[in-house]
Amino acid sequence: MSKTTTLVLEDGTVFQGKSFGFESSVAGEVVFNTAMTGYPESLTDPSYKGQILVATYPLIGNYGVPGQNTKDNLLEYYESDKIQISGFVVSDYSHAYSHWNAKKSLHEWMIENEIPGIYDIDTRALTKILREKGSMLGKILQNNTDIPFIDPNLRNLVAEVSTNKKQTFGSGKYKILLIDCGVKNNIIRHFLKRNTTIVRVPWDYDFSDEDYDGLFISNGPGDPVKCDITIKNLESAFQKDQPMFGICLGNQLMALASGAQTYKLKYGHRSHNQPVLHIESQRAFITSQNHGFAVDNASLNDQWKPTYINLNDQTNEGFQHKDKPFFSTQFHPEASSGPTDTEFLFDLFIDEIKKYKGDDI
């Protein structure tokens, strides 16, 4: 640890720092997260696939990482089964850690997952660059080696993080078909608390003959237009009446399936404190978010209406069908980590399923 390491941005900006984690060079898209806590959850979030993550909170590693406990066949304290980011950039890495639940250091965990990190750089200056110029390509270079820049958004990142087999979780009354585009474990946890059986299928799974009570489309990384198969499958699902709920990438995929358009944000929304407004009630909520693309509200046709907007930049944060029980949000009501202001959306989805089945709410 502590070898001299370099972070290079595509605009030529260079930051000199020190190494922690796995010793290797890596390239990806450099993005920042403003969360003060929750790095084990953020690092295992599949929505970060292909990205070099900058933590704006200066002290990282001070509470280590938890163990590999499982509950409901899911890792209890993580959002997937491995670190998903390509590299980690922090200001001050804590070599000593202390927490009741810690089993190892962040450094050790990153070595196990072969993820390089760089610390002792001015992340405030780096974040200002990304705020002015937007997310950009970058690379972490070690041992005086150079590698080319790589744009991960040119790949189908969803195919890289989605499950490759059909899986079942729980044994509740209501069957939810979950289209896994890079689902966070906490989404499944929230559903399992609500008397459901979750059937998790790959992103490109043909579910036209599946029997289910509700359809859920998960979060995930990259450009949504790469998920052409999922979009076509959703177009067919729109012809049915089973309730449908999408989160994050699921919001964008439902929009594309409806005929709307998406676009890349300048630097994306990646934090625990993004304020959104529920248009109908004019209530504001603080949300957790992690996405680089957004839905173009103006492109929604007259069968759909926006439901939430971002109070910082007025971008779309959700929409719903005017007649059928289809709705989605760009933010993460399951958080993990982050605020739980909008957890009630899971209850609303279950209520729609109960209505569809003729059950009492």
Image: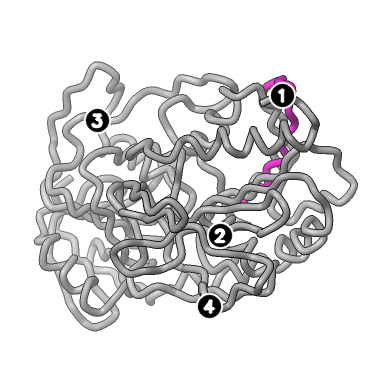
| Kind of residue at disc 2 | Phe
Nearer-N-terminus badge (4/2): 4
Residue 29 in the figure: left or right of residue 247: left
Marks 3 and 2, Cα distance to the nearest angstrom?
A: 38 Å
- In depth, the one of 351 and 166 nearer the eye is 351
- Residue 159, image x and y in percent? 63, 57
Q: Quadrant of the N terminus?
A: top left
- Looking at the rendering, the stretch of residues picked out in magenta corresponds to 170-181
Answer with mark 4 or mark 1, whichever residue precedes in sequence: 4
Q: How many marks?
A: 4
The residue tagged 4 is: 298
Q: For the view shown, which residue lies furthest in the bottom direction?
A: 11
Residue drawn 18% across and 74% down? 129
Q: Alpha-carbon distance for marks 4 and 1? A: 37 Å
Answer yes or no: do the residues labelled 1 and 2 have beta carbons within 8 Å?
Answer: no
Front tag of 3 and 1: 1
Badge 4 vs badge 1, beta-carbon distance below 8 Å: no
Q: CA distance from mark 1 to mark 2?
A: 26 Å
Number of other residues with Cα within 10 Å of mark 1, as a class: few under 14, some 14 to 19, many 20 or more: few
Q: Residue at x 18, y 42 (%)?
A: 60
Q: CA distance from mark 4 to mark 3?
A: 45 Å
x and y, in percent, of residue 141 in the image: 26, 65
**Dot label at residue 319:** 2
Nearer-the-camera pick, 279 or 186? 279
Which mark identifies residue 103?
none
Q: Work out how far the residue at label 4 is from the one at label 2, CA to CA, in angstroms.
A: 12 Å
Mark 1 lies on residue:
360
SS at mark 2? Answer: strand
Location of mark 3 (residue): 64
